[in-house]
Amino acid sequence: MSDKKYIIVTGGAGYIGSHTVLALRNNGYHPIIVDDFRNANKDVIERLESLLDEEVIYFSAACQEEPRLRGIFSQFPIHGVIHFAAYKAVGESVEKPLMYFDNNFGSLISMLELIKEFNVKHFVFSSSCTVYGDPKQIPVDENSPVSYNSPYGFTKKVNEEMIEQFIESVSEIKAISLRYFNPIGAHESGKIGEEPDGIPNNLLPFITQTAIGKREELTIFGDDYDTPDGTCIRDYIHVADLAEAHVAALNYLADANDRTTVVNVGTGKGTSVMEMVNYFQEETGVDLNYRIGNRREGDIPSIYANTSKANNLLNWEAKRSIREAISSSWKFEQFIKEFRK
Ligand code: WQD
């Protein structure tokens, strides 16, 4: 039997997934991408291959296509599964809750059935700081109360609980849910990054698309919050650091005493929207066209992570600065403009 550590990465062609594939490979794991490319471009695979200088193993399949996935699980001895594949747009989930329930619950159920059937011992789940809703106290730690304010948030919260109850029913499988804060940035090469479909919801892609001329202007959603400069505060984490947290999570699971756990993955530092805009202008020298607009419905004033658990349990911490994240995103925006010509 091969002693290679094969890791199935669902959604491995997506934004966080693709960076995690690079981090896994650079740390001795053998990622296998399972993605149906409904929300990612197939050329991500070629770009990963050029960065890694080797072929990438991938299968074009949806998580709910269990017979196809069975074929993949029986072809390789699978050490672990990292499950990214999910819908993730808060606004869309309010419009189409059933689509979110079907995909985000259905995909997780398929993956849990498969790891049980094939005796896969390690499972890493993409959760979100959205499970903290509008926190009463910040920073939030893993014991802070959880709630939800969208069908999307509801799926993440319930998914975490589904994993916990599933783990009780089996022996030997260990799982971890990583609660991501706000991922930003791109690979240092500028060749892999976030490429949203249509108008970006998230702040930094909106900034870079405005700076490059794809969007007219950035609207800052409110400057009358109870924060030092009146704009909202978030914990922006470099996607390359976040990717490395997945490697740390797999390493942890191999020797973990607890069979399920949840861990915050953030930097522990809050940054306001106005600070982000200023950092962007300073880093790139581009004058950003922006205006102050109304608050966006559903936005919370402020959240950032207490990262002690990630530091102690996973032996991981965010290393890259927010400025590095911003300049790598800008590099990617310029790269992808040429690439898509
Ligand atoms: C960041 C800040 C906006 C766009 C989302 C999801 C959450 C989680 C993380 C996955 C806010 C402001 C934004 C713009 C702006 N995702 N903004 N103008 O809202 O913190 O969280 O991503 O699990 O569930 O909701 O991220 O990037 O949308 O916004 O002023 O055009 O930027 O108001 O303060 P958010 P974001």
Image (cartoon, rainbow, N blue to C red):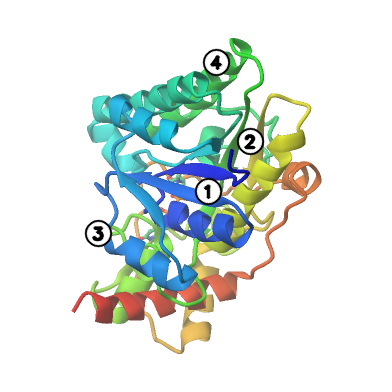
- Mark 2 or mark 3, which is nearer the start of the sequence? 2
Q: Residues within 10 Å of mark 3 (few under 14, many from 20)?
A: few
Residue 136, disc: 2
Residue at numbered disc 1? 301
Residue at numbered disc 4? 166
Res. 9 in view? yes
Q: Which residue type does callout 1 highlight?
A: Pro
In this rendering, the label closer to the viewer, 3 or 4 = 4
Alpha carbon distance from label 4 to label 1: 35 Å
Label pair 4/1, CB-CB below 8 angstroms: no
* Label 4 residue near ligand 1, CB within 8 Å: no
Q: Does residue 340 appear to the left or right of 316 in the view shown?
A: left
All told, the count of numbered labels is 4
Q: Which residue type does callout 3 highlight?
A: Ile
Q: Position of residue 214 (x, y in %)?
A: 23, 74
Q: Which residue is pictured at 59% across the width and 69% down the height? A: 322
Say which quarter of the image contains residue 6.
top right
Dot 4: what SS? helix
